[in-house]
Image (cartoon, rainbow, N blue to C red):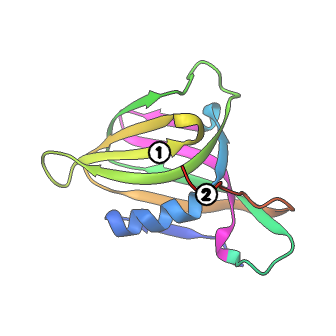
Amino acid sequence: MDSLKLIALDDADLAVISACLQDAVFKTGDTAFRGKGGAFTLEANRFVWEEGKSRKTFERRRALLAVKQVRSVRSRGVNLKDADTVHALLALRFLPGQEAPAGTVELVLSGGAVIHLDVACIEVQLADVGGGWETKFKPRHPLGG
């Protein structure tokens, strides 16, 4: 499969990127915020969901998420001092602000942790930045509450 390269400029686009990043894993130290340029980046090992369900083995790829137009970053449940803590990304979602197109891009993590990116507008890019590697394990989510 070809390397993934996507851009999101609205809610619908962001939902596609969210689906591609579901179950991606990363370390706290794999995130960066450049306040002067307004960019938040996250390097992750994403699970390749788009390959289909009929495979006996699965794949992960190194990917870079870049969120632009970021005004500030807040987090809950993330120890920023421990760069080696591993997180699983469950979803990206957009919460509209009081004045469009501003709002908050939330990175919802396992264990109830969240990274909040206050943005002037949705401008998000996702790209595979390395080759893939095989994994026999497909992420599973329990049904129900």
Q: Provide the residue designation for mark 2.
A: 143
Whether residue 9 is visible to the viewer of this picture, yes or no, is: no
Range shown magenta: 31-50
Q: Position of residue 79 (x, y in %)?
A: 57, 22
Q: Disc 1 vs disc 2: which is toward the camera?
A: 2
Q: Nearer the viewer, residue 102 or 107?
A: 107
Mark 2 closeness class: few <14, some 14–19, many ≥20 residues within 10 Å: few
Q: Say above or below: 114 vs 100.
A: above
Q: Provide the residue designation for mark 1.
A: 107
Q: Say above or below: 100 vs 19.
A: above
- Image quadrant of residue 142? bottom right
- Is 24 magenta? The answer is no
Badge 1 amino acid: Leu
Element type where label 2 sits in the image:
loop
For image coordinates 55% across by 69% down, the residue present is 5
Q: Position of residue 141 (x, y in %)?
A: 65, 55
- N-terminal-most mark, 1 or 2: 1
For image coordinates 36% across by 69% down, the residue present is 12
